[in-house]
């Protein structure tokens, strides 16, 4: 098949790109070339800014695709642009939405594609919902051949997946663990979550590419392994060969701090227990199995990051914030003990 990705070098898309090339597909990657050193050999780069519609039109003149996927569309305006560019160019258009779009708070922790889409806590999620609505209207009114994919937390070798971190990534939390310092876990750490390795996500995604049964459908792709956040952090500590020193702090309290926006990331996403039902994916992609256990995958990620200093971006401001929040908690406990 002939396939075009808008993006193609991110956490999710890079793994899919590698798998498609290995399978022998003709893969075109449309991006600005900032990370194209990571492209799989055999992929065909198209260097341009997706917002430069005149240049894109010239680049794809004479080209038609079996599938086009946009990994960097976040608001309906992005998809309106895509529709102008690609409506006559593809047999399938895949939009990467987000599992954070699902109902918050949930009426049922078991999540299927029919779970309502509503998230009052996070603008990012509301924008993804608006994108889905726009595409479904195109499908219903004009037959535009769309497929919507909803990932949850998907990770690769370059970043350890965590819930509470600063603006510069997750390394500072790992650094705190290695230094024997306490780390913050939202709530009591018993809410349920799913981590999906990007190599597993790629298998599900590739099974939807060119799949006529996936047209007009929304499909979530996750692992079937469900863990508590306490277990997730414990797996990370074990991979580092250090004891976990966890401090549990209410998600509402964290969201109330003005230093970081945890309202969307926690109350609108990771503070909620989620168990994904992948029955629909397995019906569309028979034989799909997410084979990478989290403890195995995160150990590979830890080993990679420790061997690559360029992925160890320190964040002293977040480090000080953690110390301050933890001290506030400890002070409150001491005050309560005095009263008793």
Image (spheres, rainbow, N blue to C red):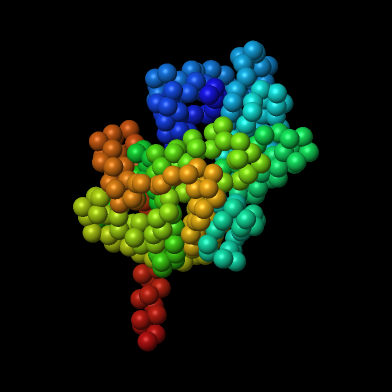
Q: Residue at x 36, y 38 (%)?
A: 158
Q: Residue at x 60, y 49 (%)?
A: 125
Left or right of 17: which side holds 66? right
State the image coordinates of residue 305 (x, y, percent, origin top left): 30, 39
Q: Residue at x 39, y 20 (%)?
A: 41
| Vertical order, 284 against 233 (above or below) | above
State the image coordinates of residue 123 (x, y, percent, origin top left): 62, 49
* Relative depth, front residue between 318 and 102: 102
Quadrant assignment for the C terminus: bottom left
State the image coordinates of residue 337 (x, y, percent, origin top left): 35, 81
Give the farthest residue toward the left: 241
* Relative depth, front residue between 307 and 219: 219
Left or right of 73: which side holds 332? left
- Residue 313: name its quadrant: top left
| Vertical order, 257 against 63 (above or below) | below
State the image coordinates of residue 145 (x, y, percent, origin top left): 67, 34
Give the farthest residue toward the bottom: 340
Left or right of 163: which side holds 65? right
For residue 14, say whether it is visible. Answer: no
Q: How many labels does the image show?
A: 0
* Relative depth, front residue between 221 and 13: 221
Q: Residue at x 56, y 65 (%)?
A: 108
Give the farthest residue toward the right: 141
| Vertical order, 21 against 117 (above or below) | above
- Residue 191: name its quadrant: bottom left
């Amino acid at each position: 098949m002939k396939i075009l990705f808008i993006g193609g070098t991110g956490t999710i898309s890079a793994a899919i790109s590698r798998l498609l090339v290995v399978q022998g597909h003709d893969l075109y990657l449309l991006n600005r070339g900032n990370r194209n050193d990571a492209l799989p050999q055999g992929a065909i780069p198209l260097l341009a800014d997706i917002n430069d519609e005149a240049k894109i039109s010239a680049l794809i003149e004479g080209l038609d695709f079996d599938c086009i996927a946009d990994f960097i569309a976040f608001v309906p305006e992005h998809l309106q642009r895509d529709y102008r560019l690609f409506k006559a160019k593809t047999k399938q258009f895949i939009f990467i939405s987000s599992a954070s779009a699902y109902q918050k708070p949930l009426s049922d922790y078991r999540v299927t594609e029919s779970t309502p889409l509503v998230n009052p806590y996070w603008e990012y999620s509301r924008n993804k919902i608006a994108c889905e609505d726009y595409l479904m209207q195109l499908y219903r009114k004009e037959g535009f051949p769309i497929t919507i994919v909803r990932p949850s937390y998907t990770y690769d070798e370059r970043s350890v997946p965590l819930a509470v971190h600063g603006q510069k990534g997750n390394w500072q939390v790992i650094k705190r663990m290695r230094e024997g310092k306490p780390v913050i876990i939202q709530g009591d750490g018993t809410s349920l979550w799913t981590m999906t390795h990007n190599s597993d996500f790629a298998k599900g995604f590739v099974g939807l590419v060119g799949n006529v049964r996936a047209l007009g459908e929304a499909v979530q792709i996750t692992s079937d392994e469900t863990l508590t956040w306490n277990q997730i952090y414990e797996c990370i500590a074990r991979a580092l060969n250090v004891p976990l020193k966890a401090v549990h702090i209410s998600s509402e309290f964290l969201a109330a701090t003005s230093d970081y926006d945890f309202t969307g990331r926690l109350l609108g996403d990771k503070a909620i227990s989620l168990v994904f039902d992948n029955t629909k994916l397995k019906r569309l992609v028979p034989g799909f199995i997410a084979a990478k256990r989290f403890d195995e995958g995160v150990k590979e990620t830890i080993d990679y990051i420790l061997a690559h200093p360029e992925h160890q971006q320190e964040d002293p401001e977040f480090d000080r914030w953690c110390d301050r929040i933890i001290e506030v908690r400890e002070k409150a406990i001491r005050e309560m003990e005095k009263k008793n």
